[in-house]
Amino acid sequence: MLCGARSTRCATTVRGPAYAGGVADGAQERYEELVDELIGTDGVTPPRGGSGFGRGAMRFQNKIFAMFVRGRLVLKLPADRVDALVSAGDGIRFDANKGTPMKEWFSLDPQSRREWLALAREALEFAKSAAP
């Protein structure tokens, strides 16, 4: 269950048509566990559900820092960190179907051995550093 036992603030899931077929085994569940782990952090809000961009996103002070898109963990990180992760073969720059990969958004390869929680914490710290 998304936003499970630790929280009463979230009653939605991030499932929908975007997650049908082609999703790495267990990726959805891994994301749900990640959400459960981070939503107790001050300023972090769980996915809102619904439709449209960001429906499966975690936010810090209303700014998206991690989301689950097309079966992949997507994180906002400093551009140089994204460059390093892409160079290491851990994923690609995220493209929101607009034809241009975003320099500060990273889409983790589902087969990568990178720790999801560690990367999400990096993204959260980056979001905190940009907060007013």
Image (cartoon, grey):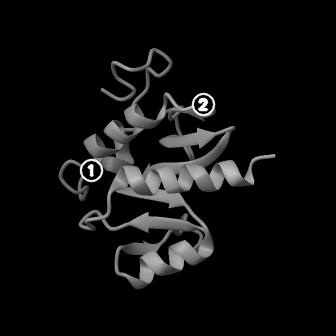
The reply to whether dot 1 and dot 2 touch (C-beta < 8 Å) is no
Q: Position of residue 43 (x, y in %)?
A: 63, 33
Foreground of the two, 117 or 70: 117
Farthest bottom residue?
87
Q: Name the secondary structure under disc 1.
A: helix
Q: Position of residue 5 (x, y in %)?
A: 33, 18
Distance in Å between CA atoms under marks 1 and 2:
25 Å
Amino acid type, label 2: Asp
Q: Name the secondary structure under disc 2.
A: loop
Farthest left residue?
25
Vertical side of 74 occupied by 2: above or below: above
Q: Which quadrant does the N terminus fall into?
A: top left
Residue displayed at 64% across by 51% down: 127
Residue displayed at 47% across by 42% down: 56
Vertical side of 59 occupied by 81: above or below: below
Residue highlighted by disc 1: 27
Q: Earlier in the sequence, mark 1 or mark 2?
A: 1
Residue highlighted by disc 2: 42
Judge the density around disc 2: few (<14), some (14-19), many (≥20) Cα neighbours within 10 Å. few
